[in-house]
Each structure stands twice: as C-alpha cells, then as structure tokens.
Image (tube, rainbow, N blue to C red):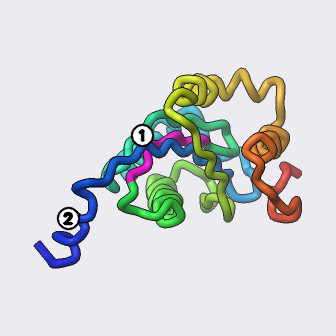
Amino acid sequence: MGIEILYLIYLMANTYTQIHIQLVFAVQNRASLIKDSWKDEMYKYMTGIIQNKDHKMLQINSMPDHIHILIGLRPTQALAELVKVVKQESTNWINDQKFTPKKFNWQEGYGAFSYTKSDVPRVIKYIQNQENHHREIKFLDEYVEMLRVHEIEYDEKYLFKPIE
C-alpha cells in the first residue's frame, strides 16, 4: 500500500458521515434518447460506477430526457468528480452499446440536492414515481422548484435547455 492510501485509511478510521445526495442531470439538448428497452441496463451500469467508487446507490430512475439518482455519498471523493466520472463513463458505455441512433451525451451541468436520513424514504418514492410525477409537471418546472425549495440561487441562462 502506498503512503497516500495508508494516510487516507488513517484519516477515515474516525470519520462518520451520513450524506444523502439526489443528482439530477439531463440528456444533451434534452433529447428523449433514454429508452425503456435499455434503461435498466444503464441503471445497473451507473450503479456499478457509483458502488465501485465506494458510494451507496439508494435509487435511480429516469425519464427519456433526464435522470434522478439518490446516493449515500462517502467523503472519500468530491461530488463533482463522482458526477464527472458517472457522466463520462455512462456516455461512453451508451455509445459503445449503440443504444441511440446518434451520439449520446449528457448535458453540461447537474443538480445536487442534500437530504436528511428521515427524508430518504420520501425521496426514494419520488424518484420511483417519475413517470406519474411528470404527467403533472414539466421537468424544467420540477427542476426550478427543487432549486427554490433548497434555496439555491441560479441564473436562468444556465438552466437545462427546454425541449424545442
């Protein structure tokens, strides 16, 4: 073992955390490319990425144009780095599998929302019920509401692009 790993193990020995994060990100240009025929395989692949980084997958579900992921985040990796890896590796995998007729990419940026342990069952149910939820509210409206509820300041020009 390298000295850096031993040092990290030493630092982590007395570290106790409970960090629950919901990630939300969209397909580039909000294209409806995520299909029912392969989305379960994508969930498994993304779950593997997250678990291989020592985080815990709590729930994952998508709509054709965006995805929600709830994780238990370990403090051993920056959230931005985890999201970068998940988006890059899943993009490469989707393209390698040729699931889409044109090149697949995730849109730049993401939302990350933290929750207490008591909120987790409600957030899991919310993510599980995306299809029903989006019959009543558009993704962009949902996303702005999440930003508002979490008191996150934002600039509208940087929000996910609306479907044209």
Q: Which kind of residue does numbered mark 1 sit on?
A: Met
| Closer to the eye: label 1 or 2 | 2
Q: Which residue appears at 71% of the width and 21% of the height? A: 132
110 w.r.t. 81: above or below: above
**Viewer-proximal residue, 109 or 154?**
154
How packed mark 2 is, by other alpha carbons closer than 10 Å (few <14, some 14-19, many 20 or more), is few
Q: Position of residue 8 (x, y in %)?
A: 25, 67
Identify the mark at residue 57; answer none if there is no mark: 1
- Percent position (x, y) of residue 103? 61, 62
Where residue 158 sits: x, y (%)? Answer: 81, 64
Secondary element at tag 1:
strand
The answer to whether one can see residue 42 in this image is: no
Task: Bin the neighbour count of mark 1 within 10 Å (Cα to Cα): few under 14, some 14-19, many 20 and up.
Answer: some
Taking the spot 53% from the left edge, 64% from the top edge, the residue there is: 80
Kind of residue at disc 2 = Tyr
Specify start and end residues of the magenta stretch as a single range.
Answer: 68-74
Residue 87 place in picture, x, y as percent: 53, 59
**Which is the main secondary structure of the residues drawn in magenta?**
strand
Mark 2, residue position: 10
